[in-house]
Image (cartoon, helix red, strand yellow):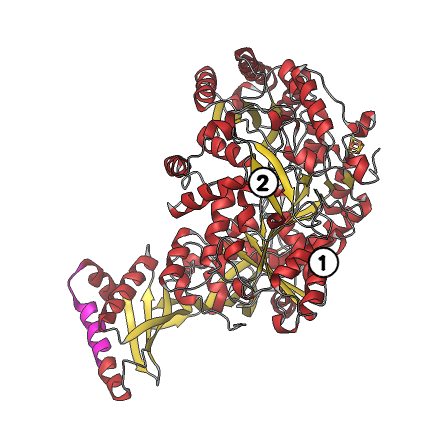
């Protein structure tokens, strides 16, 4: 083991934002690695400013470092200029805390947010001087693991990863480290350890599964080696919130994307929007006790000095005691010049009322996501809001002084027709009319209606996993139509790149064979693909072509009901039967009510856990 | 005392050393404000949509440069002894940032309008593998000549320094050459100082030494031959 710290100073003298590489933040933990029974480096395959804005990194870092025997350090993807310096000086990827090569840790754990960070994973392994594929890695290398929402179809990166951790990581990460230190003690080698790990719930060891494909390219059969479980069932913690009590956020010295204190008030969402991966893979809804949230916020703000706190969850206005929570917060934070933010507002006037409540001092922008322009299409995607809800919401917001309204819509949703796009246009027009009546003449020019349009990308483990994505031509046509029709005063439209969305769609439902294309793309220089200025569709196209990948097969093809999917081994909790029923209901424009309000829909979760809601 | 008519202001000098030198000026401001909040220093906030504590600093330090002579003014909402202030804030500052001195005042002018010159130190290190001890003196001479030369050149920048470079001293230590200089400030000083550094670095063609550290030592108001520190200016 080479635990000598790397001298990073000569490298960072001439790079952008050098502070991102030096660590030393308040609440960062420095342990003596030699004295710990097991060590892990948490790797985030994007910049520091993105990674430090991710809740999971903070949670895992705390859970592990609170354990006396284990140590967790952090590493992030270096920006291009830093990478150049590292390669020039032959400096390996290092950890922020001890500045030792990440190769020296027992485990290197990637947090995978989405498909567009796959090339960064490859690049980081390469920078770490670790062979990219597990088959090329001997005992001298750390165990490479991965978790996060991006591994619910782990297959495209399966050849790179020793094992995947599916679902909530708070408990299982300790199980993993305990097992590791026990087996290390017993003298097990790395392969034997990985094999043993496969016995822990929710862990998926890809090398124990083989795929056989049909001539049409789809999966024919999955062969399970030895006596490994047929499925890796998602880890679900039911004592949610007990971890958050002692959570000490690392306070970056330098600005990050979410530069504020946060508390996770709730995990999971039961709305059942059919396009939404997060809405399924984080079920069931688990709420944190309101008093404990209040205590955490008051204590956390005192300890960190932050001037803003965010109440995080997938749908914070659905937290059952949200009104009480906000009112108490307001009372408690009176005079402390602290802002409260709600990241995810439901599209109704109740949400505006809540936003009003917490924004006495600042009233700039509100964000809502109607997602589709007509009632019909919103029924298809199970977004249970009406046109009236949207208008009431806009009316409430505009009349109480909000000047910017941001609206999210998708194009390319299943069954979408041009009339659904006209629906989007109608909604915007109607909001403009509302603004004319609600906003005083002298202020009208300040009104901004920001419309963000994203191409729909079908995700695995959702009811739309059977659906093909619209082709680029169709998506372009639809988007251009909207662009033309929404050229209006006070309306500002932002479009998410269709090309990036297509690459995302390919890998979202891709299989192991795609790992080769990822490597080719990386070799050609693809990295930071989620960064607009870095993404190169041309390079990706060349890489896919080089490996004879049929884009249509992965992105645009409609799947048969009984097709075996590459992510079949991962059991997200919602069973196939339920998801398919939801898909059929979608096609019939039938909605499924929120199970928290209308009772259990038997999504499948009730078969693996005692669902606290049902 | 009538509220708000007599403001309580604390002027403090602080250092920015080691790793924290890599944060930007904006980061520094945020970091100071958060530390002041943690330290429960009673601060006066601005009115309006985005209330902010009234913290003003003198001249921004470039990312990567260090300092033992940074200054800031903070307006308090309540009286607080400077001793308590220094203790509380230092308990909350991350490594590398430290308040060295504080003085409470009823205010005058802003820091940046009071200051007109700064003292810097450039520390060059020898490359031991290339420089034999006896050569050090020669290098020192080279440096001195070049500094004077630079100052006398008729280029635009040199002219600038002729007016601005108030004095400089070069000394040689066993491992370093240290250049101390006092420079009058105006617009775009960082750029000008950078020019100087670039110029000195170009001497590095000889590859015998390298710029190890840029340290801001202090800032002053120069009044004739008198150098007044920001604390004396408060009177
Ligand atoms: S098991 Fe029933 S109650 Fe629980 S999340 Fe699924 S549908 Fe909702």
Residue at horizontal 52%, vertical 12%?
Answer: A418
Q: Which mark is residue A211?
A: 2
Mark 1 and mark 2 in contact (Cβ < 8 Å)?
no
On screen, residue B102 above or below A506: below
The spot of residue A432 in percent (x, y) is 55, 17
- The residue beneath circle 1 is A174
Q: Quadrant of residue A404?
A: top right
Depth check: A568 or B199 in front?
A568
Quadrant into which the N terminus of chain A falls = bottom right
Q: Residues within 10 Å of mark 1 (few under 14, many from 20)?
A: some
Against A220, residue B182 (above or below) is below
| Span colored in magenta | B141-155
N-term mark: 2 or 1: 1
Q: Secondary structure at mark 2?
A: strand
Residue B102 vertical placement versus A417 (above, below): below
Residue A593 position within the rendered picture, expressed as x and y whole percent measured from the top left: 76, 23
Look at the image and say whether residue B146 sits in the magenta stretch: yes
Instruction: Tell me the crowding category of disc 2: few under 14, some 14 to 19, or many 20 or more residues within 10 angstroms, Cα based.
Output: some
Residue B198 visible here:
yes
Q: Taking the image as four quarters, which one is ligand 1 found in?
A: top right
Circle 2 chain: A
Looking at the image, residue A329 sits to the left or right of residue A215; the answer is: right
Nearest-to-viewer mark from 2 and 1: 2
């Amino acid at each position: 083991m080479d635990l000598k710290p790397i001298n990073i100073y000569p490298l960072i003298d001439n790079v952008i934002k050098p502070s991102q590489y030096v660590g030393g933040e308040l609440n960062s933990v420095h342990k003596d690695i030699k004295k710990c029974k097991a060590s892990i480096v948490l790797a985030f395959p994007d910049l520091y400013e993105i990674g430090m804005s991710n809740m999971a990194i903070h949670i895992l870092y705390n859970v592990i470092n609170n354990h006396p025997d284990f140590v967790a350090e952090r590493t992030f993807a270096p920006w291009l200029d830093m990478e150049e310096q590292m390669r020039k000086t032959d400096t390996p990827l290092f950890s922020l805390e001890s500045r030792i090569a990440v190769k020296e840790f027992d485990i290197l754990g990637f947090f995978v947010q989405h498909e567009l960070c796959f090339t960064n994973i490859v690049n980081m392994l390469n920078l770490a001087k670790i062979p990219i594929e597990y088959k090329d890695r001997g005992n001298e290398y750390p165990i490479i693991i991965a978790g996060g929402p991006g591994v619910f179809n782990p297959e495209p990166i399966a050849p790179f990863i020793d094992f995947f951790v599916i679902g909530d990581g708070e408990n299982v990460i300790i199980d993993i480290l305990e097992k590791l230190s026990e087996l290390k003690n017993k003298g097990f080698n790395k392969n034997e350890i990985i094999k043993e790990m496969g016995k822990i719930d929710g862990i998926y060891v890809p090398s124990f599964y083989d795929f056989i494909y049909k001539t049409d390219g789809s999966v024919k059969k999955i062969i399970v080696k030895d006596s490994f479980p047929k499925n890796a069932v998602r880890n679900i913690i039911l004592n949610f919130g007990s971890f958050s009590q002692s959570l000490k956020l690392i306070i970056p010295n330098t600005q990050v994307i979410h530069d504020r204190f946060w508390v996770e008030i709730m995990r999971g969402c039961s709305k059942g929007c059919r396009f939404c991966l997060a809405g399924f893979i984080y079920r069931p809804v688990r709420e944190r006790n309101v008093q404990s949230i209040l205590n955490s916020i008051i204590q956390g703000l005192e300890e960190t000095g932050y001037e803003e706190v965010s109440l995080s969850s997938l749908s914070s206005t659905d937290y059952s005691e949200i009104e009480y929570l906000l009112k108490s917060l307001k009372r408690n934070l009176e005079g402390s010049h602290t802002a409260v933010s709600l990241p995810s507002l439901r599209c109704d006037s109740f949400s505006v009322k809540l936003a009003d409540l917490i924004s006495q001092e600042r009233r700039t922008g509100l964000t809502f996501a109607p997602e589709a322009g007509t009632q019909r299409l919103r029924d298809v995607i199970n977004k249970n809001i009406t046109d009236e809800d949207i208008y009431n919401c806009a009316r409430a917001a505009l009349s109480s002084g909000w000047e910017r309204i941001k609206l999210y819509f998708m194009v390319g949703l299943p069954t979408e027709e041009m009339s659904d796009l006209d629906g989007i246009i109608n909604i915007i027009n109607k909001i403009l009319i509302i603004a004319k009546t609600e906003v005083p003449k002298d202020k009208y020019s300040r009104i901004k209606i920001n419309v963000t349009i994203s191409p729909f990308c079908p995700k695995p483990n959702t009811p739309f996993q059977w659906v093909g994505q619209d082709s680029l031509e169709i998506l372009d046509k639809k988007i251009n139509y909207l662009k033309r029709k929404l050229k209006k005063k006070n309306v500002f439209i932002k479009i998410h790149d269709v090309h990036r969305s297509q690459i995302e769609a390919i890998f979202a439902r891709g299989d192991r064979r795609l790992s080769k294309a990822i490597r080719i793309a990386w070799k050609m220089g693809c990295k930071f693909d989620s960064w607009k200025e870095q993404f190169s569709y041309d390079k990706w196209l060349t890489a896919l072509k080089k490996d004879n990948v049929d884009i249509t097969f992965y992105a645009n093809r409609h799947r048969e009901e009984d097709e075996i999917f590459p992510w079949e081994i991962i059991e997200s909790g919602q069973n196939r039967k339920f998801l398919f029923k939801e898909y059929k209901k979608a096609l019939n424009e039938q909605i499924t009510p929120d199970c928290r309000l209308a009772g259990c829909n038997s999504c499948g979760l009730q078969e693996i856990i005692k669902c606290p809601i049902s | 005392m009538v509220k708000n008519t007599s403001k309580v202001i604390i002027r403090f000098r602080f250092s920015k050393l080691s790793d924290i030198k890599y944060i930007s000026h904006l980061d520094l401001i945020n970091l100071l404000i958060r530390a002041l909040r943690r330290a429960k220093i009673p601060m006066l906030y601005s009115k309006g949509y985005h209330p902010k504590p009234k913290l003003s600093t003198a001249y921004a330090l470039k990312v990567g440069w260090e300092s033992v002579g940074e200054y800031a003014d903070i307006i308090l909402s309540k009286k607080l002894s400077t001793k308590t202030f220094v203790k509380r804030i230092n308990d909350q500052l991350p490594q590398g940032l430290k308040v060295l001195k504080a003085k409470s005042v009823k205010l005058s002018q802003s820091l940046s309008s009071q200051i007109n010159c700064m003292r810097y130190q450039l520390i060059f290190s020898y490359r031991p593998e290339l420089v034999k001890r006896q050569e050090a003196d020669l290098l020192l001479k080279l440096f001195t000549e070049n500094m004077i030369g630079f100052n006398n050149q008729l280029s635009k920048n040199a002219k600038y320094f002729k007016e601005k470079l108030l004095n400089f001293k070069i000394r040689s230590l066993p491992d370093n050459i240290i250049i101390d200089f006092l420079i009058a400030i105006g617009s775009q000083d960082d750029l000008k100082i950078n020019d100087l550094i670039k110029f000195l670095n170009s001497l590095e063609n000889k590859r015998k030494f390298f710029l190890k550290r840029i340290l801001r030592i202090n800032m002053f108001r120069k009044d004739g031959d008198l150098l007044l520190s920001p604390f004396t200016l408060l009177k």
